[in-house]
Image: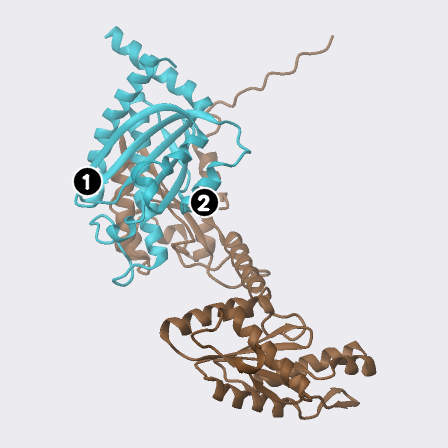
Chain colours: A cyan, B brown
């Protein structure tokens, strides 16, 4: 995949996030901002180094992973800073079912729900413009920084290199920080490459 | 000539007729129900029929929330609404929400009788860019739940065992050291009293040599049991090693600790049945000390109590000695 296609993909992802943001705002009942700081090649281990940089290094994190499959197969990791729990409670689009104060299970459910919705919008935001569809596996909590690191440093995986799409997620009037990392391992890069080529050819022909 | 392996003939989609696909949905061992945007149930498979006792003809065409009033309606409506809106999957896990439908787990023989734990996947059925309906796939996660529960129980037992003494069941030295460290910090912070009593069985070697190690073990158990009965519930007692024990008395000054130590001494000294036909008498020697400003932490307390205990031994055993800096450290 060359630089030109990577640029095209970045452009495509930016557009996709526009649509995803609009849908999310409707679902969550509040203004949503999705910013794509970059699409790049990376390896699994350097994903962990994100946690050591900038604002992420200063506080504890919550992380949710979720696999997706279909036209592209890969996995997402959504990380939140520790303020997220306190700031999700009164989100219009997030219901707490029991008492006033959410239980730990309810906090986790809120986080998994939010993560699933955001991740779904982001991944579909890439797949849809390419006329592809994907299915999703269930999201699971990884817990804190040390656990994320432990998972990312496992040796026994088939591939290490892949394409990573970073999406920063922000909610209006809430200060918690969160980022979606969409990891597409090698086999999926060819599918993306092919789809982008098709799209570019189509644009050139029209 | 070797024949070419026959090319697998792809089954034409037509051949896998919709009737066969419907049979799959009907017979698969997961629950599948499909609902329209207004909550009308469109599909209800055999798994759900069997486990809820509600037949398809009694639910298909009805409103899901009206038919199952016990469902968490507001939450479920929001969940479904999002799937329709975002055309995206949604999930629930038994870890956060044990079940969607309260149904018995389907193991009448080996099950625990608890409701079936369920993992649910909400799948948008999209046609021409529109979500026509949403299918909810319900997977029985009771096995995972049960192994997780057993794992948690095992971990709790292990954690408890790692701080207990195998012979007596009272706390072990490791737990004693942790606890004393914490109590010293607490007493220092809140300026409260803290005392320590160290004691051991007099002439323990003689008991072992005369009656054997099994009776020696009985003697150790006896002392631990008596000590537990005599001390307050807020006190802490551990087997420090061999025939030696340590009690921590939070909130007590040395004078009161000495009284408690005397109660221990006289209480343990009563005869007990080591076996059905052996009654044994034994005595203990004790050393007492209390936390002062110049105490050298938890280690210092143990060392002082040990010195006081040594003084009791030297003075003839079966007695309580209170640590005094002037006499003992010189």
Q: Chain of mark 2?
A: A
Identify the residue under disc 2.
A147
Tell me if I can see residue B126 in this picture. Answer: yes
| Residue A155 place in picture, x, y as percent | 54, 34
Identify the residue under disc 1.
A26
| Residue A49 place in picture, x, y as percent | 40, 34
> Could you tell me if the residues under marks 2 and 1 are in contact, i.e. CB atoms within 8 Å?
no
- Element type at marker 1? helix
- Element type at marker 2? helix
Above or below — where is B300 with respect to B156?
Answer: below
Q: Residue at x 66, y 89 (%)?
A: B318
Q: Gap between marks 2 and 1, in whole Å?
A: 33 Å
For the residue pair A107 and B118, the one nearer the viewer reads as A107
Task: For label 2, count other residues whose C-alpha is less than 10 Å away and answer few (under 14), some (14-19) or many (20+).
Answer: some
Indicate which disc residue A94 carries: none
For the residue pair B6 and B212, the one nearer the viewer reads as B212
Q: Chain of mark 1?
A: A
């Amino acid at each position: 995949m060359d630089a030109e296609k990577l640029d095209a993909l970045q452009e495509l992802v930016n557009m996709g996030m526009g649509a995803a943001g609009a849908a999310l705002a409707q679902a969550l009942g509040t203004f949503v901002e999705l910013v794509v700081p970059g699409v790049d090649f990376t390896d699994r281990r350097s994903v962990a180094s994100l946690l050591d940089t900038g604002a992420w290094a200063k506080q504890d994190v919550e992380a949710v992973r979720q696999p997706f499959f279909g036209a592209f197969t890969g996995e997402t990791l959504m990380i939140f800073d520790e303020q997220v729990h306190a700031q999700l409670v009164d989100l219009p689009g997030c219901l707490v079912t029991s008492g006033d104060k959410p239980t730990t299970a309810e906090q986790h459910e809120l986080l998994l729900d939010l993560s699933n919705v955001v991740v779904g919008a982001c991944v579909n935001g890439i797949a849809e413009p390419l006329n592809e569809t994907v299915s999703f596996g269930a999201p699971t909590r990884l817990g804190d920084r040390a656990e994320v690191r432990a998972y990312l440093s496992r040796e026994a995986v088939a591939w290490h290199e892949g394409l990573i799409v970073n999406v920063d997620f922000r909610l209006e009037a809430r200060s918690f920080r969160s980022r979606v990392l969409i990891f597409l391992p090698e086999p999926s890069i060819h599918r993306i490459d092919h789809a982008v080529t098709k799209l570019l050819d189509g644009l050139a022909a029209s | 000539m070797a024949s070419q392996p026959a090319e697998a003939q792809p089954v034409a989609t037509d051949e896998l007729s919709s009737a066969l696909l419907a049979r799959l949905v009907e017979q698969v061992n997961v629950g599948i129900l499909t609902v329209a945007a207004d909550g009308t149930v469109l599909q209800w498979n055999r798994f759900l029929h069997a486990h809820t006792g509600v037949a398809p003809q009694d639910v298909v065409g009805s409103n899901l929330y009206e038919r199952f009033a016990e469902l968490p309606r507001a939450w479920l409506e929001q969940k479904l609404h999002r799937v329709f809106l975002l055309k995206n999957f949604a999930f629930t896990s038994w870890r956060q929400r044990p079940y969607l439908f309260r149904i018995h787990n389907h193991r009448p023989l080996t099950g625990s009788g608890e409701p079936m734990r369920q993992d649910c996947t909400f799948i948008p059925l999209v046609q021409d860019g529109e979500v026509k309906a949403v299918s909810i796939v319900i997977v029985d996660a009771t096995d995972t739940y049960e192994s997780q529960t057993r794992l948690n129980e095992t971990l709790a037992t292990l954690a408890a065992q790692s701080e207990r003494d195998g012979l007596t069941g009272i706390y072990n030295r490791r737990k004693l050291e942790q606890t004393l460290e914490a109590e010293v910090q607490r007493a220092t912070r809140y300026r409260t009293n803290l005392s320590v009593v160290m004691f051991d069985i007099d002439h323990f070697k003689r008991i072992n040599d005369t009656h054997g190690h099994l009776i020696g073990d009985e003697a150790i158990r006896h002392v631990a049991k008596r000590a537990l009965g005599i001390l307050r519930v807020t006190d802490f007692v551990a087997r420090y090693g061999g025939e030696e024990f340590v009690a921590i008395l939070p909130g007590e000054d040395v004078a009161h600790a000495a009284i408690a130590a005397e109660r221990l001494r006289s209480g343990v000294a009563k005869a007990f049945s080591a076996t059905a036909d052996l009654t044994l008498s034994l005595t203990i020697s004790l050393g007492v000390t209390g936390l002062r400003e110049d105490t050298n932490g938890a280690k210092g307390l143990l060392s002082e109590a040990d010195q006081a205990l040594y003084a009791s031994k030297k003075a003839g055993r079966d007695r309580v000695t209170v640590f005094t800096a002037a006499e003992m450290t010189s």
